[in-house]
Amino acid sequence: MAAEKEPPTDPAPDCARHIAQAFAHYNAEFRSITRRAPLHFDSRDWKTSQRDAVERIELYDRFVDSSIAELRAKLKDRALDRQLWAHIRRHFEAEIAGLSDSEFTKTFFSSITRRLFGTVGVDADIEFVATDLDPLAGISAGRDTKTYANRGSLKLLFENLLGDLPFRSPWRDLDKSVAHLAADVSAHLHRLGEQRTAQKVEIIAPVFYQITRAYIVGRITGRGLMVPLVIALKNTEGGMLVDAVMLSEDQVSIVFSFTRSYFHVDLDRVAEGVAFLKSMLPRKPAGELFTVLGRAKQGKTERYRELMRHLEHASDRFAHAPGERGLVMVCFTLPSFDVVFKVIRDRFAYPKNILREDVVAKYQLVFKHDRAGRLIDAQEFKRLRFPHARFAPELLEELAAETANTVHREGDNLIFDHLYIERRMTPLNLYLRTAAAPAAELAVLDYGQCIRDLAYTNIFAGDLLLKNFGVTRHGRVIFYDYDELCQVTDCHFRDIPQAVHPEDEMREEAWFYVADNDVFPETFINFLGFDDLQRAAFMRVHGEILSADFWRHVQQRLREGELLEVLPYQPHRVRVASSA
């Protein structure tokens, strides 16, 4: 009698466990890299800190890709069996029930299925729909916090707080840092006209690290009182000191800006940390806070969820973004939603001579680079679906004519195979046309500082036209057009040669040889649309930017390995100088 065949085993439970374990391994490695930040701060090893930042960014895609390869090998010809994946999804949801930050795990699962199946839009049967995931639902900010009560002396409170910090490095002058901190808090409360007592200070216990600085993040509370508190710490050869104290929503918002590199902070429950930050920064979208804490994929999921929910209640149409049309991107907005959508054109008009893959590579460079508060965080999305009827006719016409390789219609929907989404700002050229003279001059000066800050982090914007820069609600100037961006150390900054013959200077084209990487800073001012007063202000403060010597000097410092700091605050240099 022939042996009875055993029924085939169901691979769904095993695959569900495999994905859950893959995320657990990813998360463990993410936190392992994050935990190295205090060591780098104590040893003042900023170069390794920067390398860790890049390694951690690359981690997510590495784990998603390896998980897909392993699942393909495990499932063989059933790797694209939708019914099986529906079962895997159900088992996976049961597998992760009760985990903290379980929405992160669901996002990881969806990343796998979307990449495996090339999902367009959403597929609720084989992924977790972003609009149903709210990582802040039911979250209270408390488990990762510490509280210090005011027992009649702010100095004593802050002495206890600073004394509790887990650093190996000594303080340069703890008494001076405590006095500095207490004085700043007292002065700020006095300026606010606050008569209420600061009863306690509540902080997120893990320290936040970003390149060369450590940050204590918390809030001052009392009866009906809540004031944000962020303390920046610097580690010098002589020891640690309080470098700055930030006590307003605007100051703290700049520290947690969408234009800065991600923090390294080891939170047990990330959603609770975001909830705490939201209490201080109510206007900042949760997605941006997840992103700036290094959870970039969850930040993308949150932005998508916010957008889809907004579309359900808004009635306006997608339309061209304000400003001049770009040669590389089609840019559009939903006026009632605070972002810009950017799609790469199929062809680039003269004088652009780059390829699509070059543009994508530039955006990847920015994603991994120190953005120094001057480069916008552009999130890359693939295979998004939007209702065709929600697009203005003139925008549809340009998309059909200029982006047919990327954008196509399916029934009542418009499918975007690839696009970038970033925060909306006012283009600098438009801002200068309407701003009052004092505000316009401040923007011009910050434009010059933006160019400097980028240079210090080894970035040359390439195209310095004002239309490629935006102004935030804080009045900060940010660069957002990356197709000609490059590293300062890759450029050849030249002085314009002296003309040999008078007629040489009359020619429309250069009468001397110009290589692809040659840059002539003297010519920058010719392309900037400043009026006379704005031009005079720029030349007074930033005139050296127009000299090749400035750029060659920055190049030399970068090539010698010097780390040129660009901070999100003004350090208290005068106050701490006496303790040097």
Image: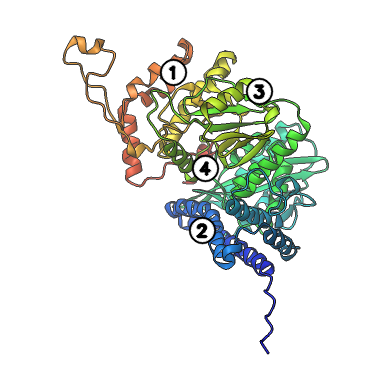
Q: How many other residues sit within 10 Å of disc 3, few (<14), some (14-19) or many (≥20)? A: some
Q: CA distance from mark 4 to mark 2?
A: 18 Å
Quadrant of the drawing holding the N terminus: bottom right
Q: Which residue is mark 2?
A: 169
Q: How many other residues sit within 10 Å of disc 4, few (<14), some (14-19) or many (≥20)? A: some
Kindly identify the amino acid type of the residue bearing the numbered disc 4. Answer: Val
Q: Position of residue 26 (x, y in %)?
A: 58, 61
Q: Is residue 261 above or below residue 126?
A: above
Sequence-wise, the earlier of marks 4 and 2 is 2
Q: Position of residue 566 (x, y in %)?
A: 48, 39
Between 563 and 375, which is closer to the camera in this rendering? 375
Q: Which residue is mark 1?
A: 528
**Do tag 2 and tag 1 residues touch (Cβ < 8 Å)?**
no
Q: CA distance from mark 1 to mark 3?
A: 32 Å
Kindly identify the amino acid type of the residue bearing the numbered disc 2. Answer: Ser
Could you tell me which residue is drawn at 34 percent across and 30 percent down?
550
Q: Position of residue 123 (x, y in %)?
A: 69, 49
Point out the frontmost of discs 3 and 2: 3
Q: Which residue is mark 3?
A: 392
Residue 182 seen in the current view: no
Instruction: Report whether 528 appears left or right of 373.
Output: left
Point out the frontmost of discs 1 and 3: 3
Per the image, label 3 sits on a secondary structure element best described as loop
Between 417 and 52, which is closer to the camera in this rendering? 417
Sequence-wise, the earlier of marks 2 and 1 is 2
For residue 173, which numbered disc appears in the image?
none
Point out the frontmost of discs 4 and 1: 1
Q: Is residue 396 above or below residue 171?
A: above
